[in-house]
Image: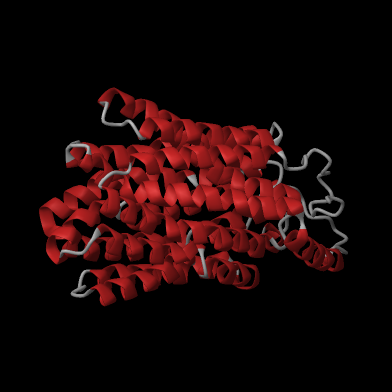
Amino acid sequence: MKKTTIYYGWWIVLASSLTGFYVAGTIFYGFTAFVDPLVMEFGWSYTQISFASSLRGLEMGIFAPIVGIFVDRLGSRIMIRLGMIVMGASLILLAFTHSLVMFYAAFLLLALGAGGCTSVVVMAVVANWFDKKVGLAMGIAICGFGAAGLLVPIVVKLIELFQWRTTYIILGIGAWGIGIPMSFIIRNKPEDYGYLPDGEPLPEVQSETDASAQEEDISFRKALKNRFFLSLLSIEAIRMLIVGTLVIHVMPYLNSLGIPRSTAGLVAAGIPICSMIGRFGFGWLGDILDKRYILSMTFILTSAGLFIFSYLDRYWLIPVFLLLFGPGYGGGMTMRGSILREYFGRVSFGKLIGLTMGIASIAGIIGPTLGGWVFDTFGSYHYLWISFACLSMVGIIIVLRLPSTRHRTRNSPSLRTLR
């Protein structure tokens, strides 16, 4: 591969963004559009259906650490290709659901496929190709997940036109048609093509193999005992509990307030779309300013947005909610990988981000089911959103207590001196 005017890493960012766009739009944000049709056809409760989403969340749970290990060994290219193949097959399988057990089984398979082509894999390959601009690159890459909100109204319309079963078949075929070609653009490491991250030339004398192996050993072992890493796990648990619950229950919640289904679909789409502001903007700011302060800003916006969300029966508050919660949510998603890359480097990044997302997603698995139980039991989501807003404020305190990243030098990416 020859070096061109445009650094090839940016093509990888584009392919990663497009892959995330389709995956998130169909199985994460788009799932809320299937909830009410499934309730109407099968008579299942919101809790039962929400639990399926929790099973899908295993892509960032049990499967995430495993994916992290495999992506460090096999590379992102193979993982994305296999993930899209499995994802397409599982979406088609959902179309033939006739029992709750079969529905859950299809979602387990979907989790396996999505885990191979989403956050862990995307962030790992971007971390390999970028250093100085890693925040910006990750922000652009996961903007695809934010733009995925554009697919929600399309999914809603497909269900109206073809019913939910045919819609799942269409989405499954689309996964193959879009995701597999994108995987051919992915390349694992810039060193394989003669240069370092950010397009820097590769030194003629390459004596860094032993040092890299040492960096991997030290950074991964230290991370497991490091205060920063443990704090990051708790921060991500808070984020995943909130986001996982809200994204799945946004349409049922708005419908319970008497807001039309078409309008609720637009709000569901608006959350990830507005998150693009934070994904890109906070990623860029994180390359310039102290990442701790940028991360704390995302929690401040999230908390404010949740307070507004709890009173969303006032229509004029909808855009206020979107402009607070969206950027806060999106910025946090970018900073998660960016700050981890800055503290611990890239050699073990796949394992570290996989472990981070895996442990944190326990809360993400609990969240949607908790939300369904709250509504089934109390007939309202109001105090759930208030409680989540307060919980997000706890995240601010944890972030501000993290040690500074400013001591880190560009030539020593792993965290060797942090206590």
Residue 153 location, x and y as percent?
24, 44
Q: Residue at x 32, y 43 (%)?
A: 381
Q: Quadrant of residue 100?
A: bottom left
Residue 367 location, x and y as percent?
42, 55
Closest to the observer, 87 or 49: 49
Figure label count? 0
Q: Residue at x 55, y 53 (%)?
A: 237
Closest to the observer, 226 or 200: 226
Residue 93 location, x and y as percent?
26, 73
Say whether residue 45 is left or right of residue 395.
Answer: left
Q: Quadrant of residue 114?
A: bottom left
Above-or-below relation of 11 to 292: below
Say whether residue 247 is left or right of residue 235.
Answer: left
Above-or-below relation of 82 to 130: below
Residue 353 location, x and y as percent?
62, 58
Say whether residue 277 is left or right of residue 214.
Answer: left
Q: Quadrant of residue 102?
A: bottom left
Q: How is this picture coloured?
A: secondary structure
